[in-house]
Structures are given as structure tokens and as C-alpha cells.
Amino acid sequence: MEITIDNQKCTEPQTCGRCLKVCSPQVFALHPLEENAIHPERWVVDPIWVSFCIQCNLCVEECPEQAITVR
Amino acid sequence: MCKWCKKHGAGGKWYLNARNYTDKLAREIGAEEYLTVLWKNFERVYVQKHFGISAKGLKYKLQLPIIGRLLRQYVEYKIHREKNLNAKDGDGHFGQVIPLEEAKLILQMAGNNEGGIARVKCVCRKVNRNIDEYNCLAFGVLAEVATKIPRYIPETGAIKLDADQAAQFIEEMNTRGRVHTVWFEPVPFIGGLCSCDYPSCTGLRMRRDFDLDVVYKAEYVAMVDYDLCVGCKTCVTRCQFGALNFSDSLGKAYISQQRCFGCGLCKDVCPENAIQLVPRGEVPGLKGDY
């Protein structure tokens, strides 16, 4: 089981965040890329709780940038 | 009484010990420096690696025969440690579920600090669902630290509350079905009171899905009085812990005391007052089960 997010395609997850809301088992986490940031410029989505993925592929369908793959 | 009450409760419960809210204690343990680092990196707590191990696939890792047990011990040790804290990892930041009545007592104590009470953005909801919700109450030093970081306050500025306004706010949260939790940040300083739900709250997720003691069960447990329960089902949507369901064969609400976290949300809506919160310590089979 592997979920990959193409950060070249997913550039502004903090304004989109559709995968975070659509995922029933709540697999994803949104966080700033840089440490110690007061004004984080770059946010990324991480499939951190991948063990909970049920492979429903809703995130893949929901992503407007086709940035998510589930294998 | 849980072990943190023995250590930091001055003979009572840890969160009812006024000393744990004071600016003096916060200064003694360097809470301001800790909180500044933690809140700048809060969203990243679970994505950092420790000795090359990340939280990714944590469920699987914890299930490994020997490594899993060692990993659990290490994580619990980090969560609860009181010295040499790594603020970026959230060391020393853990909490307990509390009923509404005690949450109100807490707000009276927290409102007396210099920093007062501030409503700040819930980090968990941002991280887990990208929802901007200003429903975490920060106390004292944390109220000062968190409101200086722009992403935790509304664009219109920080929301400061007095104790009565804060009590009104958590009552509203209770009506909406949120569990009240109180947090060491870092232990023994008490930094805030949150309104949580599962699984959007990372603490409740860590506890329910991984059985890691990031959040302890409350000092109470809910019991249904079957003489009073009329089976109206008002309470059944309120449980965040999978402890309450409607038993068709009994025609009444059923609560599993093994699963109950003692938040009291079911009791708060019961029109017949058929649900009581009983101190955990008075139930022999549940004593010490936090």
C-alpha cells in the first residue's frame, strides 16, 4: 500500500485541502514544509496515516490536479 | 487518582491545582521558550522523524513483535517526559478528558493569569481537515505566545475572553457535541482547554487508534440508571468514543464503561437525568483505568 502525492502538481494545498476533507479514514496531514516558520510559504499534504487507507480512491478522484496516486 | 494528580495535583486533581496555571510556574520551567518553538512547528510534530522513524504507518510499526513494544515504550516516554524536552516533537504535551463542570472551574483559575484566555486556531483541525476553527482556549503564557503567530489568530486580530465568556463558549461547544480536554504544555504547566472530536483531534486519534496515552480518560465514568432511562435516544449521537449505543432489547441506552472516557456529553443532554458520572476510583473494576 502506497500513497504518493506529486508536490509539483499539488502546490497550494492550504487553499484547496479537498483530499483532507473527502478522506473518510483521515489519512492525510497538512503541514508547513519549512521548520520554525512564522509565515509558512509552502504547505504540503502528507499521507501520514497510510495504515488506515481503505483504497476507496476518493482522494484520487477529488484531486483537481491529479496529484495523488494510490497503489 | 491518576499518576499526574499524585505528582502535580497537590493532593487533588492536577488540573484543579491553581499553581499549574500560574505565570510563576511557567517561568520556572521555561514554558515560553518551549511554547514558542512548539507552536511554530505544531503542524509538523507527527511528520518529523525520530532516529529515522516517522509516524508514517505507525499502526503497522506498533504491531511488530519486539520492535513494536520498544517503539511504544519510547513514544510514551517522549510524550510524558518532564526534562530535556524537545519542543519540536511536542514532548511533555498531553492531556485528559474532563466534564463540562470541571472545565468551568478551570476557566475560573486560568482567567486570573496575566495572559488571560485567548481563542486560537485548532491546530489539529487545520492539519487533519484543513478547517480554520478558532475553538482552542489558550491560557497565560500560551495565550501570549500563540497570538503572536499570525496563522493561529483571525485576520481581524486575537480573540481574548474573560472567564465568563470562555465558559459560555465551551457550553456552546458542548451543545455542538465537543469533548472537553485539558492539556499540559509542557507538564506541569497547563496551557489550554480544547473542544475535541474524533478523529479530527490528533490527541483523540492517537489514543483511540494507537492506544497511546496522549489523552487520558476522565476521572469519571458514565452509568445509565435503567429505572430513569425512557429510551428516548437523545444521547446516542453524543458519544465520540464508541461507548454508547441504543440497546433495542433493553429499550434503553447502553454504555460500555470499558470504553467510556467520562466526558459527560451524554449526561449533559439527558432529559430524564438518567445518566450519572461516577468517579472512576469508586468503581473497583475501573480504578486506575485511565
Image (spheres, coloured by chain):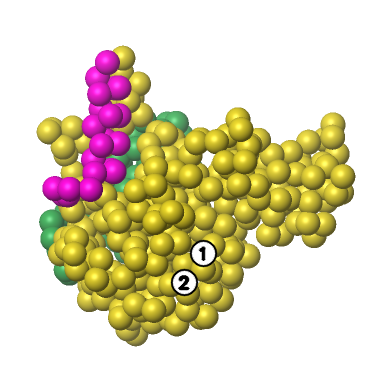
Chain colours: A green, B yellow
Q: Are marks 1 and 2 in contact (CB under 8 Å)?
A: yes
Query: Residue at horizontal 71%, vertical 59%?
Result: B269
Q: Quadrant of residue B113?
A: bottom left
Q: Position of residue B166 (x, y in %)?
A: 49, 76
Residue B190 higher or lower than A30, as above or below:
below
Q: Position of residue B244 (x, y in %)?
A: 67, 41
Q: Name, please, the residue furthest toward the front.
A: B11
In reply to whether residue B72 is colored magenta, the answer given is: yes
A8 or B95: which is nearer to us? B95
Q: Quadrant of residue B127?
A: bottom left
In the picture, measured across the screen, residue B121 lies left or right of residue A24, that is left
Q: Position of residue B239 (x, y in %)?
A: 62, 48
Image mark 1: chain = B
Image mark 2: chain = B
User: Which amino acid does the dot numbered 2 rest on?
Assistant: Leu
Residue B103: numbered disc: 1
User: Which amino acid does the dot numbered 1 rest on?
Assistant: Ala
B57 or B89: which is nearer to us? B89
Q: Name, please, the residue furthest toward the bottom.
A: B156
